[in-house]
Amino acid sequence: MASAVDIEPPNSSISSAPSFAIRPPNNNHPTTFLRSISTKEASNFSEELSYSPPRLSTSVLPSNTCQGRNSQPSTPRLSFTLNNPSKSVDDHAEFHQTSYRCITSVLKKDGQILSVAVSNGLVYTGSQENVIRVWKLPEFTECDHLKTRTSMVVSLQVSNDMVYAAYADCKIRVWRRTWEGVIKHVRVATIPKVGSYVRSYISGRDKMMKHMGPISSLAINMSDDILYSASLDKTVKVWRLSDLKCIETIQAHNDPINAIVVGDDGVLYTASDDATVRVWRRNFCSGDGPHSLTVSLPAKCSPVKTLALTTDGGVLYGGCSDGYIHYWLKGWFSGQLQYGGALLGHTHAVLCLASMANYLVSGSADSTCRVWLREQQDCQHVCVAILQGHRGPIRCVSVFQGRLNEESEDGCIICTGSLDGVLKMWHVRRTSIGDKGKGSSQNACQYFEIA
């Protein structure tokens, strides 16, 4: 594992950009990484990450919805206009001062890192190769790896001691984690099962068929014993965890589905290239509890590539291919989602989002990762840090509470995986300093230091 690597702050002046090789750190001359300025588009297993996103020339988005898109006629839609877009990091420089460096940078010969998941002090990373690597925190050492004959782990979900991994062959592998002295993982199932697939093909029951396109995202609803899988074939399949059988196929969108997320209340959110986020509720009054469409949230003609939901389910975020992050607020009395605004900052497509407490972390094809703080009073967002160091689009991100060692303070740990094949870990903690020109702690203002 590579040791700590110092990263130059964004406003530092560097005469020449370093080569693409990762050089060992030096105390006198720390290694620096610069974001490569390029118009090349990101690429992955099925080109769903390939964009040439147009940049809007005004901060106010048009209020009209997309024209020429096919949509379900019965789909209710919510229109919106962008008022008072969130301020950038420069607008709040006097209130939020940031400094940061990368704590850990790991490069394996696994190709592009496509997925990451965190559970019980373990970090799981999936890549182009046929291996899922398991890292132990806080020392961040590799403690196990899961191998299959199929390559490309495009999505990961961990619940309790079960690991669900979606592969490029449109199947899901299930692993069980054991703690007998050492950490081990035993493969227990493959979804769909071969027997179920053959029987459903003979009987013509489409709901038991496997996905006809690559799986793009997974989500777990433990309270209802359900695993959701979204695919580029425009469907979402509902799997019962107790017997790993498909109980429903949702024809969710008219274009490929890029991301799904499920709330604690069982509400399912799907994001698609048709520039909408759709909200689904399960109907327990009929059959096996099929899902019905509640509302369709437009994202202003920009394909929605990723979703994130706050822990309490009060805020839904959608990252788009034009670099904007739209968010919707749930009314406490009505429970309806209302458009809240857009976060402006990324110059390329937003490929991944992660939320924890009042933090939102976004990874983009512009090779940067932004840390946003949501203010409780007015739900405005402030970009408090821009993490630079990757040389390729950031494909996956995870954020969780923790500490690096016994001496360090509690804070946020951010793991970022990129198409450059590098996995990085950052530690975020909140500190206080006095106002400029004032030494009294009573007048101290809070800022964020990443160290």
Image (cartoon, grey):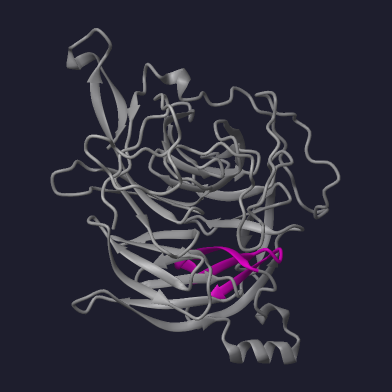
Q: Quadrant of residue 63?
A: top right
Above-or-below relation of 95 to 152: above
Q: Quadrant of residue 78?
A: top right
Residue 353, placed above or below residue 377: below
Q: Which is nearer the eye, 333 or 204?
A: 204
Prevalent SS, magenta region: strand
Seen from the viewer's position, the closer of residues 258 and 358 is: 258
Q: Is residue 317 left or right of residue 360?
A: right
Q: Residue at x 14, y 48 (%)?
A: 406
Q: Position of residue 322 (x, y in %)?
A: 65, 39
Name, please, the residue furthest toward the left: 407
Question: What is the x, y in percent for residue 356?
Answer: 39, 45
**Image position, residue 234 (x, y; %):** 71, 63
Query: Quick check: is 233 in the magenta stretch?
Result: yes
The number of callouts visible is: 0
Establish if 364 lies above or below 292. above
Let me know if residue 335 appears in the view: no
* Farthest right residue in view: 68
Front residue (pair 378, 362): 362
* Magenta residue span: 214-240
Find out whether residue 439 is within the magenta segment: no
Query: What residue appears at the point 67 percent right and 80 percent down from the top-left corner?
Result: 209
Q: Quadrant of the C terminus?
A: top left
Q: Position of residue 36 (x, y in %)?
A: 52, 39
Above or below, 102 against 156 in this view is above
Seen from the viewer's position, the closer of residues 121 and 26 is 26
- Extreme top residue here? 437
Q: Residue at x 26, y 50 (%)?
A: 3
Q: Is residue 164 left or right of residue 293?
A: left
> In what quadrant of the picture does the N terminus appear?
bottom left
Q: At 51% from the left edge and 23% from the top edge, which residue is drawn? A: 87
